[in-house]
Image: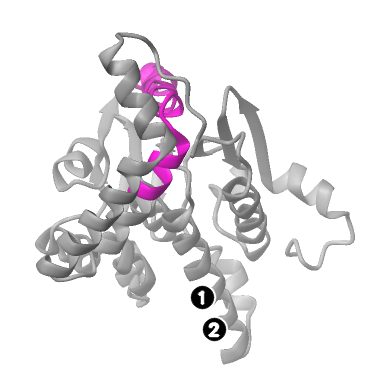
């Protein structure tokens, strides 16, 4: 039974499929389908989408960490759910839901960090690639194995192709072979890999460092970064220059410069 078909309340579904914890401006979103390696059912994607939408509008939220419960981060789409969809329309709707979710991660005005362990496969690998930063433990395996079952990882290739080199992306997509964390780091899919016992600390080090920054500065910077990727060089520089001018006029920029000159910690107003 999918989350949509369940008679329990949305609050109860949320308890089952997605956990949310907060502290000091850092929001932890935990995919909570450990028995299915946190595969992205329609219900889980809906809850994750709702959480990201709420976080985007919440000034208290400064950084997001996405992680998985149990033995792995995320094994991709729920294949049992996919095979239960009997019409083209329902399958299109599922793909559209996934694409919207991945774009919401990219467009979220708060930095999003993937905390990865165990396995990140297919749409799970897509989710890692969609996050702004990613840290994995040394035992994690990454793969886009759809080709092994006759189902090319078409939507994961979009995120993958924008975050690793073309030859590396095609190697993953064409072979379907799993790669280890050091290789994922070499390919540029993750920022760091650490021993399992150091994963929490490494992710929190990133999150706490980012949470101390002006959320206004981070928001306009993240937005500009992703916008310029699809522009030619001249247009990218023109856009970046204009954003920088607007940034210079912001209260937080004035405060940051003053604090630097006066050798004190800045007090951000996030504007």
Find residue 65 and report its horizontal and vertical position in percent: 49, 36
| Residue in view at x 30 percent, y 54 percent | 243
Find residue 130 and report its horizontal and vertical position in percent: 38, 54
Dot 2 and dot 1 residues touching (CB under 8 Å): yes
User: Where, by quadrant of the figure, is residue 23 drawn?
Assistant: top right
Name the residue at the bottom extreme. 88
Which residue is identified by label 1?
A: 95
Q: Residues within 10 Å of mark 1 (few under 14, many from 20)?
A: some
Please state the extent of the stretch shown in magenta in the rendering.
195-221
Which residue is identified by label 2?
A: 92
Q: Eyeballing the image, is 215 above or below 7?
A: above
Q: CA distance from mark 2 to mark 1?
A: 5 Å
| Residue 112 visible, this angle | no
Q: Is residue 27 or residue 2 the one in the foreground?
A: 27
Find residue 239 and report its horizontal and vertical position in percent: 24, 62
Find residue 124 and report its horizontal and vertical position in percent: 43, 54
């Amino acid at each position: 039974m999918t989350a949509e078909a369940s008679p329990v309340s949305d609050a109860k579904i949320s308890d089952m499929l997605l956990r949310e914890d907060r502290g000091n401006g850092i929001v932890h979103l935990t995919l909570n389908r450990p028995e299915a390696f946190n595969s992205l059912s329609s219900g889980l994607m809906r809850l994750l989408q709702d959480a990201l939408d709420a976080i985007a509008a919440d000034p208290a939220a400064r950084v997001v960490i996405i992680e998985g419960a149990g033995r792995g981060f995320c094994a991709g789409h729920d294949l049992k759910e996919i095979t239960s969809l009997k019409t083209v329309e329902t399958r299109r709707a599922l793909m559209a839901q996934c694409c919207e979710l991945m774009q919401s991660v990219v467009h979220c005005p708060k930095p999003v960090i993937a905390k990865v362990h165990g396995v990140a496969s297919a749409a799970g690998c897509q989710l890692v690639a969609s996050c702004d930063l990613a840290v994995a433990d040394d035992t994690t395996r990454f793969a886009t194995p759809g080709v092994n079952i006759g189902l090319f990882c078409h939507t994961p290739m979009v995120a993958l192709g924008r975050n690793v080199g073309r030859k590396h992306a095609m190697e993953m997509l064409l072979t379907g072979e799993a790669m280890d964390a050091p290789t994922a780091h070499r390919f540029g899919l993750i920022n760091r890999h650490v021993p399992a016992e150091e994963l929490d600390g490494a992710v929190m080090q990133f999150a706490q460092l980012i949470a101390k920054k002006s959320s206004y500065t981070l928001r306009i910077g993240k937005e500009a970064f992703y916008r310029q990727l699809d522009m030619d060089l001249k247009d990218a520089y023109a856009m970046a220059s204009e954003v920088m001018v607007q940034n210079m006029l912001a209260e937080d920029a004035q405060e940051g410069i003053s604090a630097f000159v006066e050798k004190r910690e800045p007090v951000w107003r996030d504007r």
